[in-house]
Image (cartoon, rainbow, N blue to C red):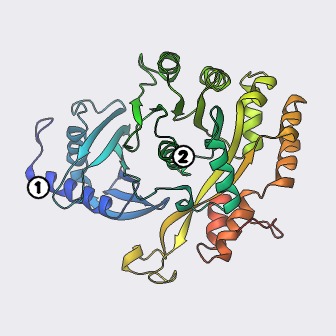
Amino acid sequence: MSAPGTIHGDMVKLVDDLLVKVINQRASDVHFEPGDEFMLVRQRLDGVLHTIDRLPRGMSENVIARLKVLGELLTYRVDIPQEGSFIFNDERLLSPVDLRVATFPTIRGERAVVRLLHQVSSIAKLEDLGFNNKDIGTLTKAASRPHGLILITGPAGSGKSTTLYTLARQILSATAGRSVVSLEDPVESRINGLVQIQIQPHGELNYVRAMRSLLRQDVQVLLVGEIRDAETAHIVIEAALTGHLILSTMHSGDPAETLARLLEMGIPPYQIVSALTLVGAQRLLRTVCTQCGGSGCASCQNTGFSGRTACGQMVPVGDDIRQAVLRHSTTSQMRELINRNYSDLTADARRLVGLDKTTTDEIKRVLGHVDTKPKTADP
């Protein structure tokens, strides 16, 4: 067995070849999962995991060691989780790619997941994301305001960060003189004109400390990667109330659930309704491959899908929602109020089916249900 940290050239080539392959196929993550007989290598493509290789069990240790070397992790520590990052460059790639690697010990050896942070330069404006015209108008109007809080919600991998980046680009383009700064964990894409800061959630430069300092540095627009706790929520609300435009995300199911979570975090209702300009939810649906029409081909890795598009429910906070929050309405009451006036996620997803961009089965996969008589969304 090789000494810790010593990796043969053929293993270096194997791992590098795998990384080049998944990067060129636009995967978002690649999993290295040790088993009794082999290591399973799977890539997440358009939100779905696909097996791309099975490596002999004897290679597992050296594969993980190579990833650790790339991520500047401790190769001799196999008993603790570790996280690192690196910029991967290869002549077979169009440009270098930021990668994040995380390892975790299991009973069959270490497991590793590599996240690929592709550039989003192809997404230049809101129209490219897939939202309906009404939601695009709602987002544009909210982003043009000098202050307030825009919250985009949804589970991990639902495209929230891409939406915030697109809004930030729109703000920079429309008002070039504004000071726009982002706090992210991690920085997922480098945007020209945007001052980007990578915070350390478990270190000294966390969201709260960074925000309190930045608000004294003449920042006008602040993109906060995620509201994870009550302390961050309080300072985000405070910033929005003191003349800043804040763009942020939360992990919640829909706008009604988001409002309920803010109340549960102890934010006074009067502050929520004064600060919050827009609360939106979104999901990503795989789009039917244009080369094969969904039957499967080499272009789409025989999945029938190529790329993803967003469906959403963007809700401006008007008088009716303000009154519901001030009354401490239940989540179901607020959801009924919102869905009465704004097409829900399922209805907007059905719009995409009508445009032949996705399928009913894909809606079921992502949303878990399909209404039989959905409210019609704007085109």
Q: Residue at x 21, y 31 (%)?
A: 76
Q: Which residue is mark 2?
A: 167
Q: Is residue 110 visible?
A: no
Give how far across and how far down residue 12 sits, in percent. 15, 51
Near-viewer residue (235 or 240): 240
Q: CA distance from mark 1 to mark 2?
A: 44 Å
Type of the residue with mark 2: Leu
Is label 1 in a helix, a strand or a loop?
A: helix
Q: Residue at x 19, y 62 (%)?
A: 92
Q: Which residue is mark 1?
A: 10
Answer with left or right where residue 306 lies relative to residue 248: left
Q: Residue at x 66, y 25 (%)?
A: 237
Give how far across and how far down residue 189 sits, in percent. 39, 45
Q: In the image, is residue 262 above or below residue 204?
A: below
Label 2 environment density (alpha carbons within 10 Å; few <14, some 14–19, many ≥20)? many
Type of the residue with mark 1: Asp
Near-viewer residue (25 or 31): 25
